[in-house]
């Protein structure tokens, strides 16, 4: 028999078709549920990674995480670090918590001990807590000598004075420039250093010399020295004297000019600071006997610069030498207790200023 067999179990064929459609619907529904689960699982971490979620952990967290806040990091950068290290749930949660705490602007660069899965506001509070620091911030101020720098580091870190002194006796390991001839004075740049646990005396001092090298580039000292017809070492030495003699920033380039004028005129520098470097920081005012001190650092009796820098000059002092004032002054004197300086081109006028200074109670 040809053609279609309409009598071949019609009811059974329709039932099969209904069962087939039902199975397809079940499979599609199952796939849809699985896809929804995958989306729900992945969307949170993806949003956190992109900083797009304000969700937050609750509580103080668990365990220990060591986190570094770098110089110049704002709330967003700190939040990115904390989220990446598993401290907070998202960067945006930390940014929101920081915005709600005005003190968050005081979060300093350094290494901190925090916890896993912390509530963002508690992470902010812990970053503001001094006891959370695991490094040792040490601030070296302009004008400090190598001896005072060693004492400061030893007082603020576990590094001993003996270890620091031993490192100073190995100048090659510190990366000193060849023209320093092994003299570290003047090359430990003033700045704040975050000394990490386990760092050695050599590590710390080398970092200060490296920072000095950066200052030379930043302040264009090499090119400036060439323009002055001076060596870089001479510029650093003169800057160290300016650093000690000048009290107010506007006077730095003027005092540098006085010393440069004296050098060009073949006059002694006549700096008290160079003698006090040899006599010590606690010596007090110079006496008449001190003025006759037989030392290359006595710049009243010896022409030219002293043999080494006398302290660590900062950017202002280095710049003052390179970008000195333009004047004919050969003398200066601190005129009042506020630190203002007066200048003179003649010895007679200088003596008048000294009398005025003494009348103002300046020794």
Image (cartoon, rainbow, N blue to C red):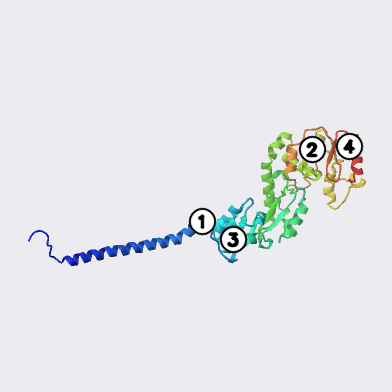
Contact? badges 3 and 4 (CB < 8 Å)? no
* Front disc: 3 or 4: 3
User: Residue 350 has which mark?
Assistant: 4
- On the image, which quarter does residue 267 sit in? top right
Measure the alpha-carbon separation of dots 3 and 4.
63 Å
* Front disc: 1 or 4: 1
Contact? badges 3 and 1 (CB < 8 Å)? no
Counting residues from the N terminus, which is met first, the one under dot 3 or under dot 1? 1
238 or 255, nearer to the observer: 255
- On the image, which quarter does residue 92 sit in? bottom right
- Residue position marked by numbered label 2 in the rendering: 254
| Image position, residue 171 (x, y; %) | 71, 51
Measure the alpha-carbon separation of dots 2 and 3.
51 Å
| Image position, residue 36 (x, y; %) | 41, 61
Mark 2 residue element: helix
- Residue position marked by numbered label 3 in the rendering: 120
- Residue position marked by numbered label 1 in the rendering: 49
């Amino acid at each position: 028999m040809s053609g279609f067999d309409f009598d071949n179990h019609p009811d059974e064929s329709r039932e099969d078709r209904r069962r087939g459609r039902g199975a397809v619907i079940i499979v599609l529904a199952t796939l849809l549920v699985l896809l929804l689960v995958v989306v729900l699982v992945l969307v949170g971490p993806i949003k956190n990674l992109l900083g797009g979620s304000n969700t937050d952990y609750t509580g103080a967290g668990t365990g220990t995480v060591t986190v570094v806040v770098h110089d110049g990091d704002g709330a967003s950068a700190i939040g990115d670090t904390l989220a990446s290290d598993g401290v907070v749930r998202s960067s945006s949660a930390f940014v929101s918590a920081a915005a709600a705490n005005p003190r968050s602007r005081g979060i300093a660069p350094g290494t901190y001990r925090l916890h896993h899965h912390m509530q963002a506001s508690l992470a902010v509070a812990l970053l503001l807590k001094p006891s959370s620091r695991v490094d040792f911030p040490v601030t070296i101020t302009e004008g400090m000598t190598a001896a005072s720098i060693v004492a400061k580091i030893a007082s603020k870190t576990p590094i001993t004075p003996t270890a620091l002194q031993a490192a100073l006796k190995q100048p090659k390991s510190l990366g000193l420039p060849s023209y320093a001839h092994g003299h570290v004075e003047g090359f430990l740049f003033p700045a704040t250093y975050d000394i990490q646990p386990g760092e050695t005396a050599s590590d710390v001092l080398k970092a200060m010399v490296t920072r000095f090298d950066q200052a030379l580039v930043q302040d264009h000292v090499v090119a400036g020295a060439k323009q002055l017809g001076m060596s870089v070492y001479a510029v650093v030495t003169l800057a160290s004297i300016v650093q000690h003699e000048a009290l107010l920033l506007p006077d730095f380039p003027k005092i540098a000019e006085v010393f440069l004028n004296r050098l060009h005129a073949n006059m002694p520098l006549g700096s008290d600071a160079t003698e006090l470097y040899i006599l010590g920081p606690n010596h007090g005012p110079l006496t008449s006997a001190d003025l006759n001190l037989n030392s290359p650092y006595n710049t009243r009796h010896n022409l030219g610069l002293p043999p080494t820098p006398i302290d660590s000059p900062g950017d202002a002092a280095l710049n003052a030498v390179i970008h000195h004032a333009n004047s004919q002054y050969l003398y200066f004197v601190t005129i009042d207790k506020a630190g203002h300086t007066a200048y003179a081109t003649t010895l007679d006028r200088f003596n008048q200023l000294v009398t005025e200074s003494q009348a103002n109670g300046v020794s």
